[in-house]
Image (tube, rainbow, N blue to C red):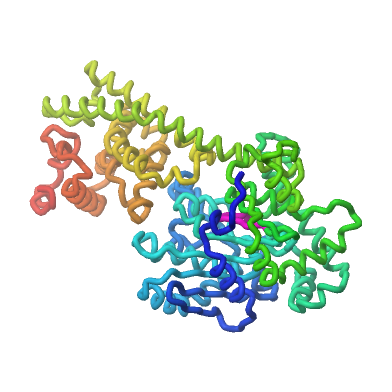
């Protein structure tokens, strides 16, 4: 924990925050406002009080993102189209539809700003916030990722509802894009919490009517507001409690059973959150699990008698950002919660008094702080796991070097290491198999951690692991394929590519393809031998003409892979399984082949 100025903690000037807040709160009917200065261009998106612009279908209105529009918004470790596992991010459909409706005109204005080499800032209040968020992700996908030298964007939202699920958050953290998003939330503001519930449409219409009036909600106690507040808090309690149990490692069977019957909101926070207390102090949090808990605990009642008053505040505070933020920015009372696992549970320690007092003003008591500590411990454990995995890089390197020596020894005897390993008649083949199995154990452990999200989100994008994984896949997967067909596993299990390929190779291939912005399946050179083995078997059952297209495609890939050095020339040795099979093809075909 640290107490510092807001500018120091989020690295954004107060003047820009005031400017974006003023623009975000300004009513306008155009799709967006544009404000240009010498150093930046700010795009502001208006909110909407129409329920149709918030919920389009179902209890929560979520939809899977379009892979073509947002290719980065997925979990690389868990997204496997080949087996029907579609682990892409989900976002609110109504917000996405609204963004897509303005994307063409927005692109034109953004192009102008990019050509002027100015920083681009997207901002929005209320439901304008999600449009600003989606616009920022679109900018990152289309401008910054292809050219990292471009000016980095910024997204600042005020009282924004949630937009995406945990995969959305995971993907942005993996790409190191979370740092571009800053969300301001006044303590009781109900709007950032709305999508954690499934509101009744009539109730939502009445609440939006009150918010639209702006002034009347300040002076009227309203039963609708109270009922709406209670409904949102009840749903939010379920989401936060379920998340807290997982953070604390509590395997409550009753909770798991209930969650399988009761559908919980898929939406989760991401980015940097700046919470404003009622006394104009600020709390900055970047841990998304902690943010979810703060959204819940900071809006709780001390007693039932407070329902109407807090319900009123939950509406009035949504419209107070422009008057409240300038006062907050003047204060130096900013608590930055960076080491959550060391969060003080009380004010007994004199050194922790400033931070603890600010947390008290946000309504974060001992129970809430325990949840925040748990979120910090989970994050800390992920980095500890990564450190453990990093310590095994040397062991992986040694294994790769040993198998490279094996490959060289085979070449000396004019035999490719694939064919030598498939026969496995010498001691060196047995030793290579032991090494293969040891490496498989290490990589399988890594894959399981990735699958369970037990490593930092950025692990999937670490270049040193992508490079190491690619070297490992190129060298060792041919041995797995040789072992698979040597033991005729294809007869029981099916073709290697369809049902036998281990996750460790799929994962390392997807990581490389993602890093290079290539289509899924485009870097399958390590599966060359599996394709050969299946063609050999297919040609025994079908005529040459039946499989001619597959053979031509394989030959084209071989020529391309050898030229780019993604496949070694040993596959062309006279005694290799591939060449022996290829020589049996019709002479007319061979004479015109690209590898003849």
Toward the viewer: 82 or 265? Answer: 265
Occupied quadrant, residue 463: top left
Query: Farthest residue in the right direction?
Result: 305
Instruction: Specify whether 115 is left or right of 240.
Output: left
For the magenta stretch, what is the residue range? 267-275
Q: Is residue 405 above or below residue 523?
A: above
Q: Quadrant of the N terminus?
A: top right
Q: Which x, y percent locates residue 198?
A: 73, 60
Point 67% across, 44% down: residue:
243
How many numbered discs?
A: 0
Q: Residue at x 85, y 73 (%)?
A: 219
Q: Is residue 305 magenta?
A: no
> Residue 344 at what x, y percent from top left?
69, 39
| Frontmost residue, 73 versus 480 | 73
Position of residue 405 measured from the top left corner of the image (x, y, whole percent): 20, 26
User: Which residue is the extreme one toward the bottom?
Assistant: 29
Task: Tell me if I can see residue 266 in this picture.
Answer: no
When asked about the image quadrant of residue 489, the answer is top left
Q: Is residue 126 above or below residue 198?
A: below
| Residue pictured at 51% horizontal, 58% vertical | 11
Q: Is residue 271 magenta?
A: yes
**Camera-side residue: 467 or 46?**
46
Residue 272 position, x and y percent, is 57, 55
**Identity of the residue drawn at 61% across and 71% down:** 21
In this rendering, would 340 be left or right of 111?
A: right
In the depicted structure, whether residue 499 falls above or below residue 417: below
| In this picture, residue 94 sits left or right of residue 585 | right
Q: Is residue 86 above or below residue 312?
A: above
Residue found at the far top of this picture: 427
Instruction: Mark yes or no: residue 586 visible.
Output: yes
């Amino acid at each position: 924990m640290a107490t510092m100025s807001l500018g120091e903690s989020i690295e954004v000037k107060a003047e820009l925050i005031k400017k974006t807040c003023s623009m975000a709160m300004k009513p306008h009917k155009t799709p967006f406002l544009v404000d240009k200065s010498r150093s930046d261009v700010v795009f502001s998106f208006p909110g909407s009080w129409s329920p149709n612009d918030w919920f389009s279908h179902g209890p929560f209105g979520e939809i899977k993102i379009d892979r073509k529009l947002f290719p980065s918004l997925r979990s690389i470790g868990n997204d496997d189209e080949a087996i029907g596992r579609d682990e892409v991010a989900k976002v609110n459909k109504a917000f996405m539809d609204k963004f897509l409706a303005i994307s063409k005109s927005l692109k034109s204005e953004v192009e102008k700003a990019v050509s002027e080499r100015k920083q681009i800032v997207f901002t929005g209040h209320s439901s304008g916030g999600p449009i600003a968020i989606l616009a920022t992700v679109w900018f990152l996908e289309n401008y910054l990722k292809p050219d990292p030298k471009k000016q980095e964007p910024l997204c600042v939202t005020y009282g924004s509802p949630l937009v995406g699920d945990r995969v959305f958050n995971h993907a942005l953290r993996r790409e190191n894009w979370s740092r571009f998003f800053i969300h301001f939330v006044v303590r009781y503001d109900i709007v950032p919490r709305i999508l954690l519930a499934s509101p009744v449409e009539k109730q939502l219409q009445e609440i939006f009517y009150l918010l639209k009036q702006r002034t009347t909600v300040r002076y009227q106690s309203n039963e609708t507001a109270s009922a709406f507040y209670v409904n949102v808090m009840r749903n939010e309690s379920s989401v936060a409690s379920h998340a807290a149990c997982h953070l604390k490692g509590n395997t409550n069977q009753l909770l798991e059973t209930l969650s399988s019957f009761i559908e919980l909101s898929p939406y989760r926070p991401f980015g940097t959150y700046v919470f404003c207390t009622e006394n104009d102090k600020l709390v900055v949090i970047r841990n998304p699990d902690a943010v979810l808990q703060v959204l819940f605990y900071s809006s709780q009642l001390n007693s039932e008698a407070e329902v109407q008053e807090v319900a009123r505040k939950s509406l009035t505070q949504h419209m107070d950002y422009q008057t409240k933020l300038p006062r907050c920015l003047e204060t130096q009372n900013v608590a930055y919660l960076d080491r959550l696992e060391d969060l003080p549970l009380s004010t007994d320690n004199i050194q922790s008094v400033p931070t603890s007092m600010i947390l008290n003003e946000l309504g974060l008591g001992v129970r809430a702080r325990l949840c925040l500590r748990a979120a910090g411990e989970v994050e800390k454990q992920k980095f500890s796991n990564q450190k453990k995995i990093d310590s095994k890089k040397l062991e992986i390197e040694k294994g790769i070097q040993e198998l490279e020596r094996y490959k060289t020894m085979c070449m000396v005897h004019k035999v490719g290491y694939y064919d030598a390993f498939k026969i496995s008649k010498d001691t060196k083949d047995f030793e290579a198999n032991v090494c293969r199995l040891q490496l498989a154990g290490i990589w399988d452990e890594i894959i399981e951690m990735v699958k369970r999200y037990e490593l930092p989100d950025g692990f999937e994008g670490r270049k040193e692991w992508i490079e190491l994984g690619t070297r490992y896949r190129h060298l060792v997967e041919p041995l797995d394929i040789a072992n698979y067909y040597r033991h005729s596993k294809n007869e029981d299990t099916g073709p290697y590519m369809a049902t036998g390929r281990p996750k460790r190779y799929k994962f390392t291939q997807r990581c490389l393809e993602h890093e290079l912005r290539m289509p899924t399946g485009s870097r399958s050179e390590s599966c060359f031998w599996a394709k050969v083995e299946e063609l050999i078997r297919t040609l025994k059952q079908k005529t040459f003409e039946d499989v001619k297209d597959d053979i031509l495609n394989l030959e084209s890939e071989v020529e391309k892979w050898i030229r780019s050095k993604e496949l070694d020339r040993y596959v062309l040795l006279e005694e290799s399984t591939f060449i022996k099979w290829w020589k049996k093809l019709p002479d007319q075909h061979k004479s015109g082949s690209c590898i003849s």
